Image (cartoon, helix red, strand yellow):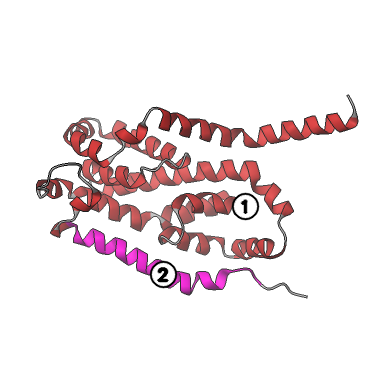
Amino acid sequence: MTVSEEADGTAEKSWVQRLWPIAIICVVLGLAFAFDLHRYLSLQAFLESREALKAFVADNMLLAGLGYILIYAVLVAIAFPAASIITIAAGFVFGWLVGGILTVVGATIGAAAIFLAAKHAFGDVLRRKAGGAIKRFAEGFQNDAFSYLFVLRLTPVLPFFAVNIAPAFVNISLRTYVLATFFGIMPGSFVYTFLGSGIDQAVANVSHDGAVTVGDLVTTEMTIALFGLCGLAILGLILKKTFLKGRGPVESKA
């Protein structure tokens, strides 16, 4: 074997070692779609089985709570598009407070998993090859990582999945990532679980035929939840124009 072939083999092995966590995530995501998991995690499916779910949770609170955390963590880690529905469901079966806490824990675990996978696969490679504005931006992020990430979590400025993996490329610590995620997603999680806690009254008010949508959950009792979502959206716009605007690439110094 030549020196060149040996080097290529080493590089190939290195990439295999780097990408195995991402590969596992992709496989699990593919299986989730292959088995039509989205059909079982839809709003309609939840509404049809909500009483059975509530009865199961009442009889198996600890098991149900741990199972929910695990399921939520996996769904977040593989970026499966069902977070809002199952958060609403948690508010219904666990109550808004317990459901919100379980959601925050599960989402934080799942986000940490995809963060570590992305960091393991691509983080140091991108940092070595990055230059100019990207490198300076990364340095600026690291200087105030908790505040920056907390604001991104608190408000819907960027998609949740994008915020899960972006910090992996700027070398922030896992501890900072977990703390900023845990506290940053609390308000939004509690708003959605509060929305779910009033679902029985909302369904009772639905008078049309056909599939029930999230819009059908709007009742007088749910107004506070909707105001909460609007408040977070407005806060996001304000912070984007103030806090985040000043956190762009920093000027290089001579």
Q: Nearer the viewer, residue 155 or 211?
A: 211
Which residue appears at 44% of the width and 70% of the height?
Answer: 239
Which residue appears at 18% of the width and 51% of the height?
Answer: 216
Residue 85 against residue 25 in the figure, above or below: below
Question: In terms of secondary structure, where does tag 2 sit?
Answer: helix
Question: In terms of secondary structure, where does tag 1 sit?
Answer: helix
Labelled disc at residue 237? 2
Q: How many marks?
A: 2
Labelled disc at residue 169? 1
Q: Amino acid at mark 2?
A: Leu
Q: Residues within 10 Å of mark 1 (few under 14, many from 20)?
A: some
Is 24 on the left-hand or right-hand side of 231? right
Q: Amino acid at mark 1?
A: Phe
2 or 1: tag closer to the N-terminus: 1
Residue 82 against residue 1 in the figure, above or below: below
| Residue that lies at the very extreme toward the right in this rendered image | 2
Question: Which residue range is magenta in the image?
Answer: 222-250
